[in-house]
Image: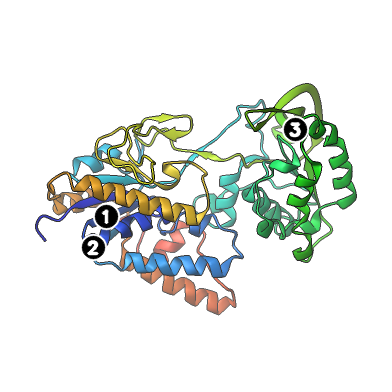
Amino acid sequence: MENQYFVAVIGAGPAGLFGARELANQGVRVVIFNRDIKHGGLAEYGIYPEKHIMKEGLRKQFRQTLELANIDYYGNVSVGTNDDLALDEIRALGFDAVLVTAGAQGTKSLGLPGEELEGVYHAKDIVYFYNKLPPFSQKKFRFGKRCAIIGAGNVMVDIARHLIDVQKAKEVTAVVRRGPAEVNFSKDEMKHLIGYLDNAEFDREMERVRPALDAINQDLEIGRHKILDSLPKADPKTSDAKFHFDFLASPIALYGEKGLLTKLEMEDNILTEKDAKTSAKGTGVKRKLDVDTVIFAIGDKVDNSFGLPTEWNEFVKNKNPRFPIDDLSFESTVEGVFVGGWSRKASEGLVGYARKDGISAGKAVWEYLQTKQPANVNSEALATKMKELNKPIITKDDIKRLEVVEAEEAKKRGLEEFKFASNEEMLQAMGLTETA
């Protein structure tokens, strides 16, 4: 079709797929490049494995999107400065616009002494591991009996569940920089973990932090309710493991023996309040916790080596956007390159948020396209580029074959769902081999 706009979407999570659909519905031809073999991003590899109904509902919507005739899918293609394709190479193919929805693939680090010890991990690596995303699914992790998770959001809850239910940890402690009122998980998530809370110990912890809360006139009961309101719906326990909160504590160092983590050092905090914002401030009082495993669940940042300018863990956005949607900028500082989902704002919201953000990004791209003539991308140049990568490139038809094989495997094993845990197994199931 002559005079059809041609847009590249990088990343096939919820933001990318809903953004692609928004554009495809306007008649735009969309090519999705995805690092993983499978599409779905965090909807496939970030949601707790047992949430089958939610996952299947999303997969159905994603399948409908990929069935649109004017959407092409190239999986197993990584984009970045040191990857299969550089962002500039994609732009050089002549796309009318590029929408980056590659998530936040960088890792936030606090730069603490001892972070390199075995037993110290980032939440994303653990979540990808138990959700069977290659190559994380094949990594070896040291999950000991005593674990600490830094953070107090839904990701902390998911990881604590995994440590107790699957890895058979005996003690899991959530280390929280501020007080109980600032925990950030939902009641619906906490019900899976709350049964393991040591109630007597929790009461003692609340009394310990009471003076710091009183000092800024914060009601202790707000935090107590936030945590304990999920008790009536608590999941039944599967072990005698204990879960603890350690409030008003910031990690400052990690210690080990022979390269293996043994202790987490923390500094006690007090709370300060300014302009209705509560902050934690160190007191200089330090203490140590015996641990085998520490997992940082403190959010994510974008990949600095992707090929776009970054600042404060995010890609730099145009502060005076030409095509704002709901007063938000989806424009990078590079002409014709847009950002959506966690590539626009890292670690912000769940799947519903990513969907809305992707749709808004698609609308911004569409408004931009109205200001220019279609460039008529050379499809042959794109096909040649894919061939030159000399590796299996996954298409929509390949994905359909993989889904059939995995569904058959699940049925055979009597499971709700089955996933191959390595790229090699997936390629084999699709009838593809490692070299093109």
Residue 82 position in % (x across, y down): 36, 36
- Type of the residue with mark 2: Asn
CB within 8 Å, label 2 to label 3: no
Secondary structure of the residue carrying tag 2 is loop
**10 Å neighbourhood of mark 3: few (<14), some, or many (≥20)?**
many
- Type of the residue with mark 1: Val
Secondary structure of the residue carrying tag 1 is strand
Residue tagged 3: 249
| Cα–Cα span, label 3 and label 1 | 47 Å
Disc on the earlier residue, 2 or 1: 1
* Colouring scheme applied when the structure was drawn: rainbow
Secondary structure of the residue carrying tag 3 is strand
Residue tagged 2: 70
Image quarter hosting the C terminus:
bottom left
Residue found at x 80% / y 25%: 286
CB within 8 Å, label 3 to label 1: no
Residue 270 position in % (x across, y down): 76, 28
Disc on the earlier residue, 3 or 1: 1
Image quarter hosting the N terminus:
bottom left
